[in-house]
Image (spheres, rainbow, N blue to C red):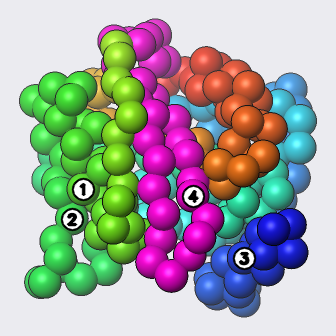
Amino acid sequence: MNKLLLGLAFAGLAAPPLSAKWKLLPETMPVAVAKSAMKVMPGQGWNSWSFRPGKKSELWSYDGPVLNQIEFIGGVVDGEPFAKERNKKDKPLPKFNSKMLPTDIAQAYEQTQRIVTRSPDFTIDSMEPVTFAAHPGVKFTFHFTRPDEELTRKGEARGAIIGGKLYMITYTAAALHYFDAHLAQAQAIMDSAKVD
C-alpha cells in the first residue's frame, strides 16, 4: 500500500505546470495566505505551492498534495465560485452568497468538490458551529474518493463569512495514516487564523 501511495504522490505532482515550486514556510512567523487578509501561523514542516487552484486560494502540503494538503480560500465575494471554473457551461460551480447559512457553505463546498475532484461519493460526515478567525463560523468533516482510485481521503474544514467575504481553511489527507498524522498540526493552523 505504501508503494501505491508514493506512486499517487508523484502522479499528483506531475499534473501542475512544471514551473510550480515548493517553498518551506517559517515555523513561528504569521503568513498571509491566498492573497487575502487572512494570516496563519504555519508551524513546522509545511510547504507552500506556487501552483494555485484558484485566484483566491493557496495550497500547502507536508508530504505531497495527493497525500495531504491544506487549502486556504480567502476573500471570496458574492457571485464567485469556491474554486476555479473548469467547465462553466456544462458543470458550473456553485457561487458564494454572503447571506449563506453555515449549512449552505458546507453544501456549496461539497457540490464544488464533487465537480472539481469528479468524486462519486463526496460526503459531509459532521457539521457544527465554531469560532473561526474570531468570528462565528462552521466546522465540518468529510470523506471522498476519486474515480479509478482505491484511496479514501478524509477532511476537515472551517470557515466564516467575514465582512461579507468567505474565508475558509480545509485539510484533506489520505485516510490511511496521513490524515491522523498531521490533523493536530492542521487544526493548530486553523486555530491561528486571523483576518485583518
Mark 1 vs 2: CB contact within 8 A: yes
Q: Decide if residue 43 is in sight here.
A: yes
CA distance separating discs 1 and 3 = 24 Å
The x, y position of residue 14, in whole percent, is: 71, 86
Q: Amino acid at mark 1?
A: Gln
Q: Magenta stretch: dominant SS?
A: strand
Question: Which callout, 4 or 1, points to the residue nearer the camera?
Answer: 4
Question: Which callout, 2 or 4, points to the residue nearer the camera?
Answer: 4
Q: Amino acid at mark 2?
A: Leu
Residue 100 in which image quadrant:
top left
CA distance separating discs 1 and 2 = 7 Å
Q: Would you say 124 lies left or right of 193 here? A: left
CA distance separating discs 2 and 3 = 26 Å
Q: Secondary structure at mark 1?
A: helix
CA distance separating discs 4 and 3 = 12 Å
Please determine whether, in this image, residue 186 is positioned above or below residue 9: above
Along the viewing direction, whichever of 68 and 125 lies nearer the viewer: 125
Question: Which callout, 4 or 3, points to the residue nearer the camera?
Answer: 4
Residue under the point 17% across and 57% down: 94
Residue under the point 31% across and 80% down: 86
Please determine whether, in this image, residue 154 is positioned above or below residue 151: above
As drawn, the label of residue 111 is 1
